[in-house]
Image (spheres, grey):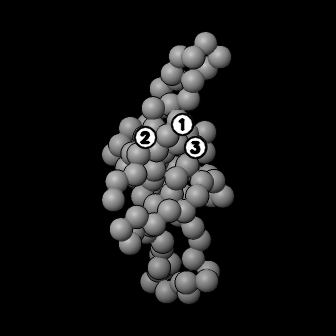
Amino acid sequence: MTLKPLGDRVLVKPAPKEEKTSTGLYISSGAQEKPQRGQVVAVGAGKTNDKGERIAIDVKPGDEVYYGKFGGNEVKIDGEDFLLLRADDIYAIIED
């Protein structure tokens, strides 16, 4: 199945949850935090301003991003978990 976000929506594949601490201890699934980092998979066309002009989204497929902890909707596509966010919920692009 293919999902094409509409408007200013962005589809993100969240990074895997941390299962171990830096010292090697395993974290129970109930104590694991939701990831706030992921990879952009698909991007909508952007929203329109008052004049009807499209405002482009700042991210593109393949970008690694940080996003808000409580933003977006979880979506399952072909058994994989994704997050559908508004472009405003993305805080930063991670550059190496």
Of 70 and 46, nearer the camera is: 46
Q: At numbered mark 3, what does the secondary structure look like: helix, strand or loop?
A: strand
Q: Is the residue under label 2 in contact with that under label 3 (CB below 8 Å)?
A: no
Q: Is residue 31 left or right of residue 16?
A: right
Please tell me the numbered disc located at residue 50. none
Few, some or many residues within 10 Å of mark 3 (<14, 14–19, 20+): many
Vertical arrangement, residue 86 with respect to residue 29, above or below: above
Residue corresponding to mark 3: 86
Q: Position of residue 49 (x, y in %)?
A: 61, 20
Type of the residue with mark 1: Asp
Q: Which residue is drawn at the image coordinates 47% and 80% (left, top)? A: 20
Q: Nearer the viewer, residue 15 or 75?
A: 75
Q: Is residue 95 visible?
A: no
Q: Amino acid at mark 3?
A: Arg
SS assignment at label 2: strand
Are there few (<14), some (14-19), or many (20+) residues within 10 Å of tag 2?
A: many
Mark sitting earlier along the chain (2/1) = 1
- Label 2 sits on residue: 43
**Contact? badges 3 and 1 (CB < 8 Å):** yes
Residue at 48% across, 71% down: 17
Mark-to-mark CA distance, 3 and 2: 10 Å
Viewport quadrant of the C terminus: top left
Residue at image coords 45%, 32%: 45
Q: Quadrant of the N terminus?
A: bottom left
Q: Which residue is mark 1?
A: 8
Residue 50: image quadrant is: top right
User: Looking at the picture, which amino acid does disc 2 mark?
Assistant: Val
Q: Nearer the viewer, residue 92 or 84?
A: 84
Residue 46 picture location, percent across and down: 50, 31
Query: Would you place residue 62 above or below residue 75 in this image?
Result: above
